[in-house]
Amino acid sequence: MEVMIKKFQQRFRKVQEEMNRWDELQSLLVSQFRNASSIIERLQVLQDSKNYGSLNRVNGIKDAVLLKQMESLQNIFLSIAKTLEEFHSITLSLGKIHRDGRQMVKGGSVRLTEKQLLLRIGIKPTLAYCLDGLMTLHDMYQSEYDLKVSLFSALSAVTLKPNPGDLSAIQQLLVDQPNIPMEEVQFIFDVVFAEEIS
């Protein structure tokens, strides 16, 4: 049983690595969203000829500036799409880690009983807790990934009819990551690695 707990702890270390990668991508994605939002907010101002003042004398300046901003926005959108692909690879990895853990418990050479899954050795977590923890973490991050994809769609839609309130609401949802309650994540890790903490 202790050997299996150690194997689960190895899986949780891999989950921790993926979560660290997620945090790095989160910072990048927030920055990309802010850059895109800035351009989207500027587009309305740039479409009004009155805002060009004496530059209106330069033939085609408005169209050239708008085109350049749209190209920049398109490049940011492509970058966001690539970042979202990396988030997706993390959710796939977390799903695989959970499936591998379930396979280890249910499909190994020795099939464990329900009682064995719930057996606690000292302060070590039960195998059932480890398995449930992996599933919970995967579900949280999968839900957050799904939200990020829908926020990107919303940002694309807002481009056509910019509204500063909508842009800030999208950004706030992105920054908050509502589907990942960090205190719950920390608690799962504290239980799994209890003997290392004590």
Image (tube, rainbow, N blue to C red):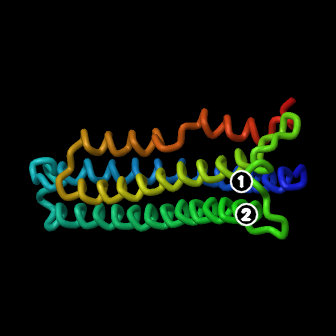
Of pointers 2 and 1, the one earlier in the residue sequence: 1
Residue 104 placement, left or right of 68: right
Relative vertical location of residue 80 with respect to residue 135 in this rendering, above or below: below
Foreground pick, 36 / 150: 150
Foreground pick, 35 / 159: 159
- Among the 4 quarters of the image, the one containing residue 156: bottom left
Q: Amino acid at mark 2?
A: Lys
What residue is shown at x 18% (from left), y 66% (from top)? Answer: 63
Residue 74 placement, left or right of 5: left
Relative vertical location of residue 181 with respect to residue 142 in this rendering, above or below: above
Foreground pick, 158 / 128: 128
What residue is shown at x 66% (from left), y 64% (from top)? Answer: 99
Disc 2 is placed on an element classified as helix
- The location of residue 134, given as percent across then percent down, is 66, 52
| Residue projecting furthest to the top | 198
- The location of residue 74, given as percent across then percent down, is 34, 66
Residue 23 makes an appearance in the image: no
What residue is shown at x 78% (from left), y 53% (from top)? Answer: 8
Q: Amino acid at mark 1?
A: Glu
- Whether pointer 2 and pointer 1 mark residues with C-beta atoms closer than 8 Å, the reply is no
What residue did someone put label 2 on?
106
- The location of residue 86, given as percent across then percent down, is 55, 64
Foreground pick, 126 / 86: 126
Nearer the observer: mark 2 or 1; the answer is: 2
Query: Label 2: how many residues lie within 10 Å, few (<14), some (14-19) or many (20+)?
Result: some
What residue is shown at x 74% (from left), y 56% (from top)? Answer: 14
| Label disc, if present, on residue 155 of the rendered structure | none
Query: Label 1: how many residues lie within 10 Å, few (<14), some (14-19) or many (20+)?
Result: few
Q: CA distance from mark 2 to mark 1?
A: 25 Å
Disc 1 is placed on an element classified as helix
What residue did someone put label 1 on?
17
Residue 105 makes an appearance in the image: yes
